[in-house]
């Protein structure tokens, strides 16, 4: 059975570092830290690789969450992919769950409304 957990989160750290620029394109690495409150409670660290130019942008990344989900404590990894055409996709990395979240699988959505950030996690355990 699939469960849904929602949370608000703050971005506590956003540290981009350009790694390459060529022909109007920029590649960068971004380190991010977040704090979650709600049915998902805890923190995460994110590593993104980004590519941007005047007409497009995309990223891939991994987010290590140290959280409780609906009261179960543990950790797991979210795999991020996003681009202008396909939008954003977040998937729990198979086998990454630990603690009381061992065996977790599923997907997530992030919604940003101005200063407010929200996570919706659809998962099975």
Image (spheres, rainbow, N blue to C red):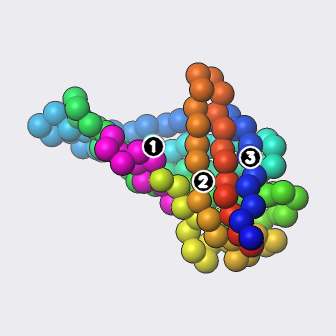
Residue marked by disc 2: 108
Distance CA(mark 2)–CA(mark 3)? 10 Å
**Which residue is identified by label 1?**
30
**Which residue is located at x 49 percent, y 37 percent?**
15
41 in the magenta segment:
no
Q: Secondary structure at mark 1?
A: strand
Q: Quadrant of the N terminus?
A: bottom right
Foreground pick, 41 / 84 = 84
Residue 92 visible in this rendered orientation of the protein = yes
**Label 3: element kind:** strand
Q: Which residues are magenta?
A: 79-88
Task: Give the CA distance from mark 1 to mark 2.
Answer: 20 Å
Task: Identify the mark nearer the N-term, 2 or 3.
Answer: 3
Q: Which residue is the site of mark 3?
A: 6
Membership of 81 in magenta stretch:
yes
* Image quadrant in which you'd find residue 12: top right
Can you name the residue that lies furthest to the front here?
1
Q: Where is 63 relative to 20, above or below? A: below
């Amino acid at each position: 059975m699939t469960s849904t957990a929602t949370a608000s989160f703050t971005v506590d750290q956003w540290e981009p570092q350009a790694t390459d620029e060529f022909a109007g394109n920029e590649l960068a690495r971004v380190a991010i830290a977040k704090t979650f409150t709600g049915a998902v409670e805890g923190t995460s660290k994110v590593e993104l690789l980004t590519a941007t130019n005047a007409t497009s942008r995309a990223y891939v990344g991994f987010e290590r969450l140290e959280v409780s989900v609906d009261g179960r404590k543990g950790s797991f990894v979210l795999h991020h992919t996003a681009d202008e055409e396909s939008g954003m996709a977040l998937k729990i990395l198979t086998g990454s769950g630990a603690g009381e979240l061992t065996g977790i699988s599923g997907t997530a959505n992030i919604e940003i409304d101005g200063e407010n950030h929200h996570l919706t996690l659809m998962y099975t355990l």
